[in-house]
Image (spheres, helix red, strand yellow):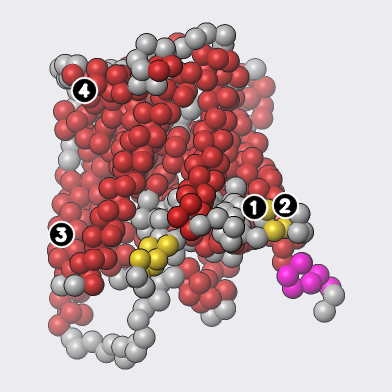
Amino acid sequence: MNDWIDVLIVLVKVVVAVVIMLTATLMLIWAERKILADMQNRIGPDRAGPAGILQGLADGIKLIFKEPIIPSRVERSVYLVAPILALVPAFLMFLVVPIGRPFHIGDREITLQAMDLNVGLLFVLAVSSMAVYAVVLAGWSSGSKYPLLGGVRATAQAISYEAALGLALVPVVIYEGTLSVAGLVEGQSGKFLDLFPAWNIILLPSFGFFLLAAVAETNRAPFDLVEAENELVGGFHTEYSGFRFALFFLAEYINIFTMSALTATIFLGGWNGPTWDGSLPSSITWIFPILWFSLKTFAIVFVFFWVRATLPRLRYDQLMELGWKRLIPGTLIWMIFFAVAFAVRQFGAPWAS
Amino acid sequence: MAELVLFIVFGIIAVVGGLAMVLHPNPVHGALGLMATMLSLAVFYVVNSGHFIAAVQVVVYAGAVMTLFLFVIMLIGVDKSENLEERLPLQRQLAIGLGVAFLVMIALIGGNAWITAPQAATEPNGSVEAIADLLFTEWLLPFEVTTLLLIIASVGAVALAQFDPRKREEEE
């Protein structure tokens, strides 16, 4: 009996996570177009619903009802699987992110996180490294030139920036002493020097490197060479139409959302924040952790959009140079420096014994 | 029970993936088969509660190594037909002979009684803490020696990739 309830809870959590991601995507599409429009002195979408807020929904419905065209030269099986492969890692990554404070029903503790893994951060890295396959296989199976170029670019970019992404997290893991995402959030509660919230953003270089690599890992501007429209038509998804294209689109926005949620969780304290537990009834206070988490996530999402509106796309050799000659040595030096400093603080200087 | 089902399902996937890797004429499909095998191995590790090893397996093999393979395959060009002419004489005969020898050896070893270590009383602990504990105490020396090996390999790669400086000047 108890086992079945546990299974049921996990199922409900996964469904809720999927619903959150889908609604977030609809909002993100609208938000991105609105924010970009504002930054470029345009109005942006304003027809569907108040202030155009239903634009994402309208786009989605349009894409579903479009005719799916399968070009004759595609490698059929791989071509059909690639859009699904794009979605799976995007969904999986969100499952380890806790979106709120655990609560109790009876004597059962329910965490607002689909699963807490002992290897949480490694799981995130593993899943995000699988995301590139969708792009590569879509590009290759399309059987035409531009998508293939997009796919080759995607592999090179993913390999280069994955390393930086992982290395940027090492100081955080050393500092917190855990790989579990829930453990990270717990470690960031309380105050630092009785003044600031004890968020991991005090490891500022890590935060910067991670955010940079995250933008590159999600193939967003200014690192969107995979789909660079003025060089590669549409990049890896040129030959996709209708719902299959919609899946790629969905995967991109879910990836942005998940990466932002992860950044907020790892560096900005996750759902930590003032809840006024004593002075307000518990029927109100439960909402605050979720609110803080959402606010932090959307702040990072805004940075993604902001960067896109501000910076021109990098040239390909610049992208590689930034990855291999700046980011990876930078993260390595910072990691070694931090490890030594932390060890000296923990165990004393090696000559002091 | 669940363990057995998972083992059968992913065992079949792993074997099929391995066969596809060797037999499929298209290199990209071959690479995909190899990836399926590697992911199935990760599932085996999870079933045996080696979460850390499973995550590392996916990051390193499925994530980095296979991406590199795909990159190289695409860079060389998928459409080039493979040159099936065998340059090494006796290669095929040697392969068959060694394969038979290997099978005989396995049959001989498998036929004998095995001495196994006494089963550990506790649950196998595959958590990061447990592995780190062993790696940095009992197995520190092998660990460091492996690191040295990797460093030598990467230095070798850099040395191989280094252009001849005179040649480079001519190009510029």
Q: Secondary structure at mark 2?
A: strand
Q: Secondary structure at mark 4?
A: helix
Per the image, the residue denoted by label 1 is A199
Depth check: give the residue in front, A281 or B172: A281
Q: Residues within 10 Å of mark 2 (few under 14, many from 20)?
A: few
* Quadrant of res A112: bottom left
The N terminus of chain A: image quadrant: bottom left
Q: Secondary structure at mark 1?
A: loop
Per the image, the residue denoted by label 4 is A64
B39, above or below A298, in the image:
below
User: Which residue corresponds to the image point at 18% horizontal and 68% vertical from the top-left?
Assistant: B2
Q: Residue A198, position in %: x, y?
A: 67, 56
Residues beneath discs 2 and 3 located on the same chain: no
Per the image, the residue denoted by label 2 is A196
Q: CA distance from mark 2 to mark 1?
A: 8 Å
Indicate left or right for B137 with A66 as reference: right
Going by the picture, which residue comes out furthest to the top?
Answer: A42
Contact (Cβ within 8 Å) of mark 1 with mark 4: no
Q: Which region is colored magenta? A: A344-351
Residue A348 among those drawn in magenta: yes
The C terminus of chain A: image quadrant: bottom right
Residues beneath discs 4 and 3 located on the same chain: no
Q: Label 4 amino acid?
A: Ile
Depth check: give the residue in front, B3 or A194: A194
Could you tell which of marks 1 and 4 lies nearer the N-terminus?
A: 4
Contact (Cβ within 8 Å) of mark 2 with mark 1: yes
Q: Residue A228, position in %: x, y?
A: 45, 18
Q: CA distance from mark 2 to mark 4?
A: 48 Å
